Amino acid sequence: MKVVLYLLLFSSFAHAQKAKVILIDEHIDGSSLQKNFDVQKNSHESSIPKKEIRDEVLKGVKAAEKWDELQKDIFYMDLKSKSVKELKKKYPAISEKELTFLKDKR
């Protein structure tokens, strides 16, 4: 009876799952985490735009010239996820016509 109990306990510990850690940046070294975690590389394209692409979309947008990198990233992602009406409310300094153009350009 004790042997069976020990085997059941051992098998449940042997099959215990490690917490999953997804590395979102290809430059992060996850080797030190592999002992305790299930380390995986991000297999999806990042929601955060590549700087070159984002800057190309925002070229000529006067309001964006004053923004820091985070504000530019958020605006770029907002272009994808928000309607023109929502964008106009959040970014009143940019015309509706320009927002529509940028949304289509993205």
Image: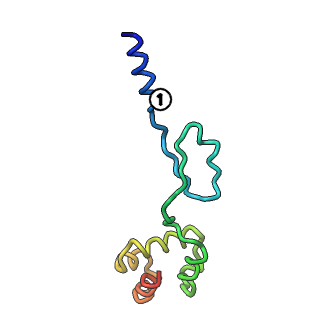
Looking at the rendered structure, the kind of residue marked 1 is Ala
Please tell me whether residue 81 is drawn above or below residue 9 in the rendered image.
Answer: below
Residue projecting furthest to the top: 1
Q: Residue at x 46, y 27 (%)?
A: 13
Q: Label 1 belongs to which residue? A: 14
Disc 1: CA contacts within 10 A as few (<14), some (14-19) or many (>=20): few
Task: Depth check: give the residue in front, 47 or 35.
Answer: 35
Query: Relative to residue 99, is residue 70 drawn left or right?
Result: right
Q: Quadrant of the N terminus?
A: top left
Identity of the residue drawn at 52% across and 67% down? 48
Q: Position of residue 66 (x, y in %)?
A: 59, 77
The image quarter in which residue 54 lies? bottom right
Q: Nearer the viewer, residue 6 or 48?
A: 6
**Residue 84, x across and y down, in percent:** 37, 80
Query: Residue 29: percent from the left, percent from the top?
Result: 65, 51
The chosen color scheme is: rainbow
